[in-house]
């Protein structure tokens, strides 16, 4: 194991920032997600794998919650009232057992794509146990444990407000590093954030597409940056629309600009998909006569942008030609490119592996695809996919019929975090290679579960039933489920 000094320095900076905001555990965990190419150590025993720094903050959160007085009673209460936590536990065990047994049971019976031993690319090979069975399963189990610890922690008063602050900090960190990366490349300084890229990934940070510098921010390449920008944009836009926060409004504007300038086809397609519910919501507001000032602002800006584009085109017909070429290369003709055809081939072979294993899957981490749902199906099989679908549906539902039982601020935070996770899932569905849904998925699961538990407790109290008290689980008869 090799410790990376720059990773330690970045962790120290995050801890200081979290301490200044009086929430070392929550702010530290969420803020660490902004550093998508910064590792703390390199595990030479696992082929040079380098866990990102968020894993250290996840471990810190789990340890801090586990050492609290009354932790077992609090955890028992969560298990007694939040049914998806049981599904998560079953999925964690199923994934770990499958990663151990399935690559050995079906060894040589199907073809998968794995990272080469030199970590220089992805190669096609017969199914066999690989180091990713350990590392990817470890990330997934760590995410599940993080969700459980967060469920316990978020039952305390004031913790949900810390979640909202943490995600705003995350958005500003991501936008700031993306802007710094772009300005450095425009100024000819190259990759100014190279010192913090300590992970053992292939760094594609100085690529150019269609004459435009590809923004990587604190990530290893533009696609990862664009995907994360899309998730942060979903959070900040939702937070602004619901709370009318000026900080969130300007953050959303900057993130939208960075997403457009990222030159990432994943970000462009994902943005188009996310614009559908936004356009539907605004259209519905105007149709019902309930348009707000924010709706008018968005429509006005879109109209002004359209007029500006037409005016510039009339003045100089070739002004937008570089942008058109970029859009054509990164989106319209992406499927016909060598990269697009290669990734489509990965997906076809992953689905074939699902069939070759009779629907059991090849095991967590045994293969690589180019779409998260396909990776889930091929690695976890039919049963694992159903369990993952249940958890995704739980996040998608959000508060559901329990809206109105929490403060507007809490409901705003829950909706914003949920949309962050859903936007991340959209990006992963377009280009995700692993069955691990990522830390955003588990954080959103914990936020939704704890909010539903609190809302149900208040509804019970209003109806005359005893409210759920996280500090007195033994005195409460758990008859309600979240």
Image: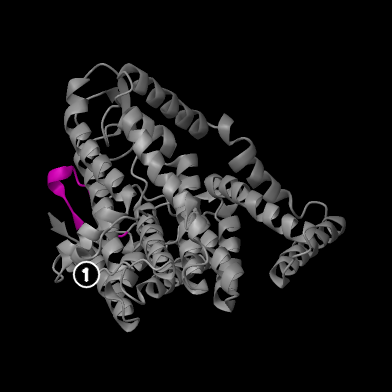
Does residue 23 appear to the left or right of 166 in the view shown?
left
Residue 392 is a magenta residue: no
Residue 47 is a magenta residue: yes
Report the residue at 25% width, 23% height from top: 127
Report the residue at 83% width, 61% height from top: 307
Residue 475 appears in the figure: yes
User: Please, what secondary structure does the residue beneath circle 1 have?
Assistant: loop
Q: Quadrant of residue 80?
A: bottom left
**The N terminus - image quarter:** bottom left
Report the residue at 20% width, 46% height from top: 48
- Horizontal and vertical percent for residue 311? 85, 61
Q: How many marks?
A: 1
- Horizontal and vertical percent for residue 51? 24, 53
What is the image's colouring?
one colour
Does residue 296 appear to the left or right of 389 in the view shown?
right
List the residue tagged with mark 1. 472
- Horizontal and vertical percent for residue 124? 33, 25
Between 392 and 265, the one nearer to me in the picture: 392
**Picture layout, residue 75 above or below residue 86:** below
Q: Quadrant of residue 58?
A: bottom left
**The C terminus - image quarter:** bottom left
- Horizontal and vertical percent for residue 448? 41, 58
Q: Principal SS element in the magenta part?
A: loop
Magenta-tinted stretch: 38-50
Between 125 and 274, the one nearer to me in the picture: 274
**Picture layout, residue 49 above or below residue 123:** below
Between 387 and 229, the one nearer to me in the picture: 387
**Picture layout, residue 195 above or below residue 374:** below
Residue 254 appears in the figure: no
């Amino acid at each position: 194991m090799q410790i990376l000094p720059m990773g330690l320095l970045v962790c120290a900076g995050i801890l200081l920032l979290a301490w200044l905001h009086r929430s070392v555990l929550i702010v530290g965990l969420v803020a660490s997600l902004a550093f998508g190419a910064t590792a703390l150590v390199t595990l030479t025993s696992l082929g040079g794998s380098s866990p990102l720094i968020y894993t250290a903050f996840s471990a810190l959160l789990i340890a801090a919650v586990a050492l609290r007085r009354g932790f077992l009673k609090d955890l028992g209460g969560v298990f007694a009232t939040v049914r998806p936590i049981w599904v998560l536990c079953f999925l964690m065990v199923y994934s770990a057992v499958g990663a151990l047994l399935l690559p050995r049971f079906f060894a040589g019976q199907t073809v998968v794509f794995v990272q080469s031993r030199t970590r220089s690319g992805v190669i096609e090979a017969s199914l066999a146990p690989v180091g990713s069975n350990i590392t990817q399963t470890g990330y997934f189990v760590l995410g599940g444990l993080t969700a459980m610890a967060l469920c316990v922690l978020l039952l305390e008063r004031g913790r949900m407000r810390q979640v909202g602050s943490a995600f705003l900090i995350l958005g500003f960190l991501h936008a700031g590093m993306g802007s710094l990366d772009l300005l450095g490349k425009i100024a000819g300084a190259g990759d100014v954030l190279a010192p913090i890229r300590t992970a053992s990934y292939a760094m594609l940070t100085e690529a150019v597409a269609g004459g435009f510098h590809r923004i990587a921010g604190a990530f290893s390449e533009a696609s990862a940056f664009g995907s994360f920008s899309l998730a942060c944009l979903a959070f900040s836009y939702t937070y602004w629309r619901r709370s009318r926060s000026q900080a969130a409004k300007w953050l959303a504007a900057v993130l939208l600009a960075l997403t457009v300038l990222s030159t990432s086809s994943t970000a462009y397609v994902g943005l188009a998909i996310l614009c559908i519910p936004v356009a539907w919501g605004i259209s519905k507001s105007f149709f019902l006569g309930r348009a707000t000032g924010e709706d008018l602002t968005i429509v006005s800006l879109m109209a002004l942008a359209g007029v500006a584009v037409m005016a510039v085109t009339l003045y100089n017909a070739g002004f937008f030609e570089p942008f058109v070429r970029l859009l054509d290369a990164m989106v319209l003709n992406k499927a016909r490119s060598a990269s697009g055809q290669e990734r489509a081939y990965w997906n076809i072979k992953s689905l074939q592996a699902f069939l070759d294993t009779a629907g059991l899957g090849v095991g967590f981490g045994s293969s690589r695809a180019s779409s998260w749902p396909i990776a889930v199906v091929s690695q976890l099989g039919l049963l694992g996919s159903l369990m993952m679908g249940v958890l995704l549906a739980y996040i998608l539902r959000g508060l559901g019929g329990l809206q109105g039982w929490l403060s507007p601020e809490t409901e705003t935070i829950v909706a914003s975090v949920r949309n962050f996770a859903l936007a991340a899932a959209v990006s992963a569905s377009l280009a995700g290679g692993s069955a691990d849904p990522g830390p955003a998925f588990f954080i959103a699961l914990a936020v939704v579960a704890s909010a539903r538990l609190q809302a149900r407790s208040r509804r019970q109290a209003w109806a005359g039933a005893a409210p759920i008290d996280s500090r007195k689980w033994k005195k409460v008869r758990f008859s309600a489920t979240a």
